Amino acid sequence: MSGHSKWSTIKHKKAAEDAKRGKVFTRLAREIVVAARKGGGDPEMNTALALAVSRAKAANMPKENIDRAIKKGTGEDKSGEAYEEVMYEGYGPHGVALMIECATDNRRRTVADLRHVLTSGGGSLGEGGSVAWQFTQSAYFTLSAEGQNEDGIFELAVLGGADDVIADGGIIEIIGEITSFKSIHDQLAGASIQTDDAGLRMIPNQEMDLAIDETVKVMKVIERLEDLDDVQNVYSNLNITDEAIAQFGG
């Protein structure tokens, strides 16, 4: 997963520095709305909301925007769109399996946009269940290894119920069952350890290896999907190598 993590970290930093704040804030607001609708408007009682708010603050999203998104999620603010969370399945170029997480107020528009990007990129939108069996939903955390006691992180993660801790390329990844998410989060937060990413993620059961140029082609399709307004996250079973990341960035 280290290639996935490194690529995600690069994209996370790029988004945080993106001058087009409006688009970044729109995506973050949708995440807050969905989290508040599912688990209530109190971040102390809703870990998903707390993480969404934390990401919004890290991107310098104004407090009034955050508060308004929470109220939309809880129903206190009736204005604006009502977003729902939907997971779509499909294939990228070369048969790479894709799970596409969306927050949308119009499923028909979302499906049309996804199908256009996938078809034009050499992939296709799949039926429900067509690729989901290739993934396991897991609790997932990443953080920079710089300045961290890796043994200490390992112990905290295990205490929280993590199944796997991977340190590679200056990045630490923590993976566990979805039921362990809050306990791992609480262990890290209790030790004042900041994560770069935290949430429930679709982890591939087995990764697919492609040639570098083929990998880059798939990465470009994934990037186009992620640029769609309704898309929150894209998960794949592609093995993304450092060499592919270097060529993609070049």
Image (tube, rainbow, N blue to C red):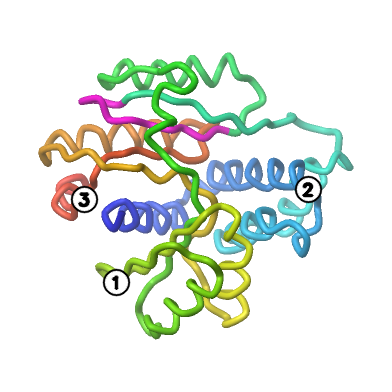
Total number of numbered labels?
Answer: 3
Q: Residue at x 56, y 70 (%)?
A: 160
- Name the element at disc 2: helix
Span shown in magenta: 92-102
Marker disc for residue 245:
3
Q: Nearer the viewer, mark 2 or mark 3?
A: 3
Going from the N terminus, do you reach mark 1 or mark 3 first?
A: 1
Going from the N terminus, do you reach mark 2 or mark 3 first?
A: 2
Q: Nearer the viewer, mark 1 or mark 3?
A: 1
Q: Is residue 43 left or right of residue 214?
A: right
**Is disc 1 surrounded by few (<14), some (14 to 19) or many (20+) residues within 10 Å?**
few
- Name the element at disc 3: helix
**Is disc 3 surrounded by few (<14), some (14 to 19) or many (20+) residues within 10 Å?**
some
Q: Is residue 97 magenta?
A: yes
Disc 1 target residue:
170
Q: Is residue 22 left or right of residue 218?
A: right
Disc 2 target residue:
68
Circles 1, 3 touching at the beta carbon (< 8 Å): no
Mark 2–mark 1 distance (CA, rounded to whole Å): 37 Å
Mark 1–mark 3 distance (CA, rounded to whole Å): 15 Å
Q: Is residue 36 above or below residue 16?
A: above
Marker disc for residue 235:
none
Amino acid type, callout 1: Gly
- Name the element at disc 1: loop
Q: Is residue 181 left or right of residue 39?
A: left
